[in-house]
Amino acid sequence: MSNRPVFPMLFGHARKLGDQASSPLNLIQLRIEQLTNASFALLHQVSTTMTFKNTHHLVVEGALEFTLPETATICGYGLDIDGTIVDGVVVEKEKARITFEKEVRKGVDPGFVEMVQGNVFRTRVYPIFPNQTRTVRVIYQDQAQINQLGDIVLSIPVQYNNKLDSLDITLMCIQTPNNQIKPQLLVNDHEFVQTDGRWIAEWHLSNVESVVGDQIISYTLPNVNKQLIYGIETDIDNHSQAYFAINYVPTLPQQTIFNSFTTSKTICAFWDASLSRSTIDNRNLEINLLNELLKIWLSNSISLKLTLVIFRNVINEKKIFQLTNNNDLLELINYLKTIHYDGATNLSELSSMVDNESFTHYFLFSDCLSTIGNDNDPSMYDKMCSIPIWIINGNYLYEPVNYSLINYLTQRSSGGYISRDKMNDDISSIIDWINSIKSKYLTTNVNQNLIQDIYPSHSVILTPNQGRFLIVGKLLSLSTSITIELEFNINNQIHRQQFILNPSDQSSINVGLIRRLWAQQKLQELSVFKDKNKQIILDIGMKYSIVTDLTSIMVLETLQQHIQYRICPAKSRTKLYNDYMKHRQTTELNKQNKFTRLLNSWQQRCQWYDKVITDTDHHRGYLWKEFSTKSKSNVGGFGVPFTPFYSSLLSNSITPQSTTSISGFSFGAAPVTTSSTFSNTFGSTTTSPFTSAFGNSIPAQSTTNVSTFAFGAAPSLTNNSFSLTAANSSNIISSQGAFSSAIVPENKTVDSNSTIILKEYDPQAPYMSRIKSSSSLDGAYEIYLSERQTYRQSPSFYFDVASYFLSSPIIGQTSLDIFNNQYTLNSFSTNVHIQSSILTTNEKSNLYGLRILTNILELELESVQLLRTVAYKLTEMNLNNLAENLFRKILNLHSDEPQSYRDLALVLLTSNKDNDEIFYLFQKIIDGEWDISRFYDFEIPVLHELNCLLAISTHHPNIIDPRLIRHLPCDLRIVLVWDISESMIDLSITEPTSENCSQYHSETFIGGMMNQRTGGLKEYLLRKAINGTYLINVSYANNRQQTGSFTGVTTVMITIYKYYGQFNEQKQILTGRLNTIGQTIEIGKVEFGDRSQEQIKLELEQYKNEYQRLLNELNKSKHAATNNSIKMDITHPNVSCDRCNMTPIKGVRYKCLLCPNTDYCNQCQLNDDHPLLCIKDSTQYSNSILLQNRCALVHLNTQCSLCAMNPIVGIRYQCSCGIEICEKCEFMCTHDLTHVRAKIIYS
């Protein structure tokens, strides 16, 4: 099927993604039907039916994303099929998406609605034909409000932003015999009319012009019982039981202010400066509230200290404001108005900022929607919750908000949520709320034999002026009245209220509102820990037909679809439902024996691997080069010259010949030996690790030499650290002994040993020319912010600009910068905040780059394509913790794609994570049932990787059939993956013979092989490389995407392994994007060739050093084990470990030579890279200055001439040239070592 763009159907806000020229579908008809039951009018149901018209000439998919109020939940969904609205059924969320995408590929009529995150929902509909319409119906249940008079107010949003052909609105209030009070509309030009015991108000309009701003219809129901309202609804599954809901307004006395006489407040304000909060009007509302709040406190002579923490994808800045007057306050407000809103939201970083400083309040300015970082477990915020957290959010009602996390934080901390509506209250009432003693609901006292499953199940803070407290539960008996007692803590006094539930008071009209309210209240508690409560959430969503984090509502058309996917139709489709029940026992067609296919494909790869490549084959390969230059016009379909001589060569059979065995180390091509043991350069004999793991399954000629250290790249002579620039560093990342290096762009300085040369990604976009024209990073960033106004919705824009910043060259890097770089990796992942004023140029470039890159995550929630785009770039940058988090999200969203498992497994392998999970992920791919039309033989490259892992692992779980176990090391392996499996991306390798290996010419004379049909992954393999250059090209062949938010580009990640699965393995990664179909880009080249004597000596020295390092590690471990019992007998009085808080330290004590007054125990010192002083007995040298608290050594009126420390703390050095040097700079030897220094301890 041809490429098909996705046009958004708007509901209250504009489309997000902007890489593709698109326009929204026109909403031409809107029908709204509202229903409430006056017996418990706090609940009402709203049905919104929308008709969209496709005015374009293409068949399109409609994607509608919308928000609902905090108290609302979707309980119904319908789609027009053959002119009739068909009801959907509740399906597991992941199953609904998989079913939808499979049916779309067939061109049929599916549709579904799902929860994205927080209060954001999405519906997808296909197909919408040119100049045709589709109708979607969304039904949701919401709660009413109670005004200051105690009356019930029901509000119905009517949102549209274009001219409508028709607008129909029906409001209906079902009355019970004892309640005939007329509803009152808040608009004067209309009123309710009573018909058959129901009050109805209707509007039927045509040619309705669009209206700017919120459009809401509201009406009131006078509340006779001002304090208590309750409703009872029979359980449709068990008519002897019922659900109940109680709305109680406790008598709250005037708020008691507990700290009105406080003379000082210390506030920590967390300010979310991510891209999603870039609406300046909303932020100004928050700033004004903060200004008024602080101004009143200052006027009451309260001393204020405010610590402002600005966070985005990382915590960027921590600034302290001492507020003593209005001028200080003005400085704070002006500073807030200059903040740039850019980057993703990482709320998990906030827990790292909770230190020993005593705060009285936390202010969190955010919508609490985290788009990056570990946000699966809100318990990480428990330490913060010891102090009241006040969450302030100026977003409109229809904008996304994570209410679950907001409720969790505010309830646990005894804080509160100040929404946009709350900001309209008088500022003094907000201050009284903050200062007051919080009243709480504590518990409900009932007869457990008569009532159960009461929610909320924990204590809840009562919000002033909210007007109500809502509680739900189940009645186990309808035969008798039941006494129930609510218990509150009001102004530190226990308040109890008893009343009677009479089951006979239940409405005769059961519309299911209370039943769903009970399920909704239970889900509200469970969804905070949705991973832990996954199965319970799923069961509730399925039983009560509501959309949750794990359930969606789906519409299918035919009986065959329902049978195929085992989805029971809605009972409202009576005939289809009955037919399905008859066919539910129908057996499915026998599936292809997957293992047989897998084994055959793996044996084919082993046969390719065992094929002997002779000199004759090499000669044939070079003939390709000769004939490709002389006979370009006489070429066949796959580029093979049709000449008589060449045809005869092709017809010749290949005769296996013996190969020469090589013992010891070999350079250039991978060494080959006839024995599983060898004598290494250092004189010891080592058994191959493959012997025990794989037995005799490996032919003798394929056994690869290994040394005593495991497979990996040759160790670099540079420091083993990440210097915050992937483009300029030579990283060594250990992965079970496997090492990898970052990218070295072609136009940058390349190490003499580097033989993988990748081109730097350059998109050649007009905005990039303007950004590159700046002579400074800050200037380039300002230009980016200016350009962002035009390209704000474009993922490609952020990817391109981020790639530029992340590959910027190092400017003016000092030796101290190099030292500091070793300790700044965590600032992009955990627990370290960044002070931009002291960043090196290289650090700032990466800080900007990562911030810009993560903006992509803000454009659309739970978009797998965008998540992969960012994750692949993070993988390239070796930021594996952040990449792992995104790959886990992708796996949760797209568990039907084997690529999701592979991506996560490889990033865990690179991070040295637990092998058991990695083996599990690989096993899921090999044993799983995948769509064979999309992922044919995807398991084979994964089997290759799993066998490599088994070869280097000491733990060999029995996870695959022994016939699939064989390690196949290769001189060259190139793997290409991309963000959407429906895209068709081609990989082609031009070998030194000029023969091109691609999916159209999959095997070459020198032994190169390309997999042909694997969707989402392309792989090139060469067992034994010949000398020369291998050129790598990638082409955008086609895009068959049928679903989702097609952004118009495809992000690719290419991983190049040299000597894959061997002791000297090298790995490099590059990401880039392809814009248009037919585009071909040159990725780079890999070079094999003879090395000079000097290079051989250098490599031998590296191997020797690595051997000695591992030997030292082994001896160290043995020594530690032998002396462990002796060491633990030693104690260091009055000394605590600054990492694990062991007091006193037992065993050997380690004192940092750079960080004053910092000590570690024997276990914690292993995780520190600073120089440490080993102290076995603190009493022996107790008077030594090295054992003292050097923080007390303050040299007033002195400043370090190298790092500007003022005053100098610790030992001071005075150089003969007249400059002052601090202890750290002296240790780093940043000043001329030939100069004479004076060591000054006390000034």
Image (cartoon, rainbow, N blue to C red):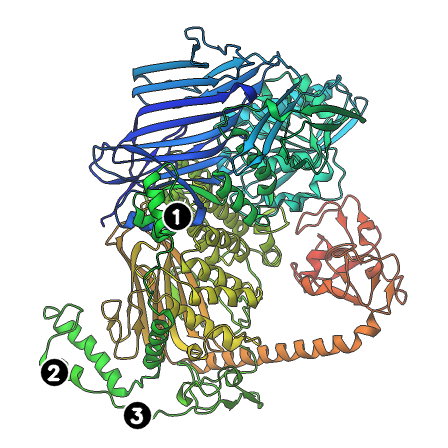
Left or right side of 133 for 535:
right
Label at residue 186: none
Q: Are marks 3 and 2 in contact (CB under 8 Å)?
A: no
**Depicted 1076 relative to depicted 330: above or below:** below
- What kind of residue is marked 2? Phe
For mark 3, does the 10 Å Cα neighbourhood hold few (<14), some (14 to 19), or many (20 or more) residues? Answer: few
Report, in whole angstroms, how far the alpha carbon at label 3 lies from the one at label 2: 23 Å
Q: Give the residue number, with chain letter if any, for mark 1.
A: 567
Q: Which mark is residue 645?
A: 2
**Depth-wise, is mark 1 or mark 3 nearer the camera?**
1
Residue 804 seen from this side: no
Does 65 sit left or right of 470 as displayed? left
How far apart in space, not on screen, are marks 2 and 1 (Cα)?
A: 62 Å
Q: Is residue 1071 above or below residue 73?
A: below
Q: Contact (CB < 8 A) between labels 1 and 3?
A: no
Mark number displayed over residue 657: 3
Name the residue type under label 1.
Ile
**Helix, strand or loop under label 1:** loop
* Closer mark to the observer between disc 2 and disc 1: 1
> Is 1117 in front, or is 318?
1117
Q: Is residue 167 toward the left or the right of residue 636 in the image? A: right
Determine the CA span between mark 1 and mark 3: 60 Å
